[in-house]
Image: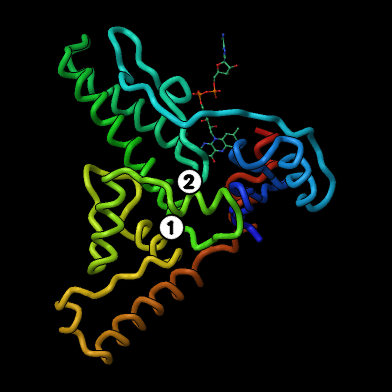
Amino acid sequence: MPYTRAIAHDAGWQWRIPLQSRVGNGIVYCSRYLDQDTAMERLLGNIEGEVLTKPNILRFGAGMRKKQWHRNCVAIGLSGGFMEPLESTSIHLIQRAVLRLIRMLPLGKTSERDVAEFNDQQITDMLQIRDFLILHYKATERTDSEFWRYCKSMPIPDTLEQKIELFREAGLVFRKNEELFVENSWVQVMMGQGIMPQTHHPIAEKLTNEELARFLATIRDTVAKTVKSLPEHAAYVSRYCGIARAAAA
Ligand SMILES: Cc1cc2nc3c(=O)[nH]c(=O)nc-3n(C[C@H](O)[C@H](O)[C@H](O)COP(=O)(O)OP(=O)(O)OC[C@H]3O[C@@H](n4cnc5c(N)ncnc54)[C@H](O)[C@@H]3O)c2cc1C
């Protein structure tokens, strides 16, 4: 299947990413709840087919620099911070920081205001991503391990608490300051993990069931027609970025 899987285990999660010539595998875990040898055993035990390379062990403490830009130094990428890879956000943050830096230099020289604005925007991005990541853990329904029991009861940032409770009360979700994760992403994770709104906005009652069914049918038809006109995934990959083609280039 040509999609990435993120599979929870009792002290974290494991990824499986099918590529053209191999499948990428990795395990993310909290060392307080799982030791390295057991993690390694688990990773290797879940690999389908031959193991091609020895696992590379990376340790990280999640966090960020409060001053991403300080005097004539700008920390971009790992030098600026790292959050766990469940939502694969690092390269996005790098790209955003580079574009932001270019936009912040209209005069060809730095001003304290540029620096302050850059730092504020960078930190906002990271805190929003942090909240979305924590949601995946906090909203767990698992109680079968010490790790998940901790996640279920751990304190969370006020900003995340506000997001969860706004949604739980009446299904409200807001996207602020060009946040990376849009409303749909938040709704999918919250509902997918069992956080359901207790009521809904009265405006939803204005649509009859028949009108709603017609509306949804139109969306289904449009999606089906669009999908029909697209090439198969394997054909698309081989045409635009097939490995033989990349090697020849
Ligand atoms: C298996 C894996 C999968 C990943 N998947 C994703 C993904 O799907 N999406 C995503 O967004 N991110 C992903 N990431 C994270 C992403 O790859 C990294 O966050 C990103 O590459 C960090 O970029 P960087 O330039 O900050 O650091 P690096 O890419 O680590 O670059 C640092 C460079 O500095 C060099 N260097 C180090 N010390 C010195 C020195 N003293 N002198 C000179 N050079 C030095 C290193 O050799 C290296 O080339 C993944 C990471 C891993 C390991």
- State the residue at coordinates (42%, 59%): 189
The location of residue 116, given as percent across then percent down, is 20, 20
Image location (x, y in percent) of residue 226: 44, 69
Instruction: Choose the circle earlier in sequence order: 1 or 2.
Output: 2
Residue 167 to residue 126: above or below: below
Residue shown at 55%/60% (left/top)?
143
How many numbered marks appear?
Answer: 2
Residue designated by label 1: 139
Q: Position of residue 221 (x, y in %)?
A: 40, 79
Foreground pick, 77 / 41 = 41
For the residue labelled by badge 2, is the local secondary structure a helix, a strand or a loop? helix
Locate residue 30: give its quadrant: top right
The numbered dot on residue 128 is: none
Instruction: Give the residue type at disc 1.
Output: Ala
Residue linked to disc 2: 87
The quadrant of the rendering that contains the N terminus is bottom right
